[in-house]
Amino acid sequence: MGGIFEKYTKSRSQRRTKTVKLQALVLSLCLWSLGPAVSLGEEAATTPAALSAAAVKAYQQKDYIRFLANEKQALELQPSNPRFLYNVACGESLTGHSTEAIKLLNQLVDRKLDLGAETDDDFAGIRKTPEWSAFVSRLAELRKPIVRSEIAFKLSDPTLMAIGIAVDRQDGDTYIASIRERKIVRRTKTGHVSDFVREGQDGFLAGASLAIDGGRHLLFASSSAVPFMRGYREEEKGKSGLFVFDLKTGKLQRKAFLPVDGKLHFLNAVVVDHDGNAYVSDSGTPGIYRLGRNGTELEEFVGAGVFTSTQGLAFADDEKTMYVVDYSDGLWALDMASKKRRLVEGPPDVWLGGLDGLSRVGNGFITVQIGVRPERVLRLDLSGQGQRISAVTVLEMNHPEYDGPIQGAVDGQAFIYIANSQLRLGNGDTGAYAEEKARPTVVLRLPF
């Protein structure tokens, strides 16, 4: 699942300090900053990250004039970055410039982005203005659902917490990974539901993402220790691996775990090439690992420090390029031979942060964007040579069934995805789980 889970930090200083951090296996994306704070030496003083760090310091000291000045400089360097645009709006409001603040917030609405201004205390001083009332009306219009899907099926078990899904194109069976119940459910094309992998079978931990190698009849499943999974033990902290099961029998073929090295790991999206080699992203300590066709050990393919938050993976048709979703800043193309990467630019008015999962369709992708409000499903169309994103289309947005929508899979001419992962019910710090609020899993079928 991309993003592992997404939640917003409550502290203003915290949420302006880091873009992405994982706390007790819960990904915390702060939409209002660019990246980790850096030292503010003279050489780095004019980079967006350094300016953002300086703004954080100024904000903490309630020096809002300096905060605004730093955010304005960052926005000049990255004028399409909505995080900086939002922060400048905050600074304008805090320094008494209501007209300027609301003008910037309206620019975000023009881009179909709601970054939480309606409940942000930074705008408390301008909420009685006529301009604010007009802005709130535009927010209400933005939040109207765009619904093109139908319910494919529901799973009656309310505590499943389904987050991974894959479809076997040969027989039409659907497989769903449970992060709470540590199992994989199979739903046949005729609607029969059963456990394909039983709870904790073969040491299976919290299920994350699934991928099918149809030619070899194998199901790949990433799995990690999460505090709110059933039977969690403290000694399992940091454990993360990739399991391979026989699709016909459900028997484990092999499994490979990362070494427990004191770092936070969460193996996530899985993609399999034509030769049977599997690649899996790590959203805890960002990177990509490879499990060879007959391998029993995970090999580092892309190390830490390259990406900020590795999520969805998909191959180009010739498999010479792997497309990688970075939750912090969008879509990247990774050359499989040189391992060099390049950002796949999109339309200037579209922000592609907060993407979860990546499913190849035609000359592009379908992905779920959970790092913004309203949450939505996007289609990304590539240019002829795949050098850039030529068009971004909102296929669905703010569906009434949404409660943590998450990654999906292609099934014929439809995208099926989980509408309600309900990840908000699990506490990644304490392991607590709000079972009384859980409800059946809803899977949507969205034609494209």
Image (cartoon, rainbow, N blue to C red):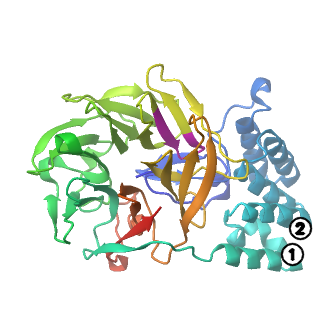
Which residue is rendered at x = 53% and y = 24% of the image? 340
Task: Provide residue 118's location: percent of width, then percent of height.
Answer: 71, 72
- Tell me the SS state at disc 2: helix
Which residue is rendered at x = 58% and y = 38% of the image? 384
8 versus 353 height, above or below: below
Which residue is rendered at x = 40% and y = 60% of the image? 413
The residue closer to the viewer here, 230 or 315, is 315
The residue closer to the viewer here, 185 or 277, is 277
Q: Tell me where residue 41 sits by quadrant.
A: top right
Residue 307 seen by the camera = no
Q: Tell me where residue 89 sits by quadrant.
A: bottom right
Provide the residue span drawn in magenta: 322-331
Q: Tell me where residue 120 sits by quadrant.
A: bottom right
What residue is disc 2 on? 98
In three-dimensional space, the C-alpha distance between marks 2 and 1, rounded to whole angstroms, equals 8 Å
Q: Main SS of the magenta segment?
A: strand
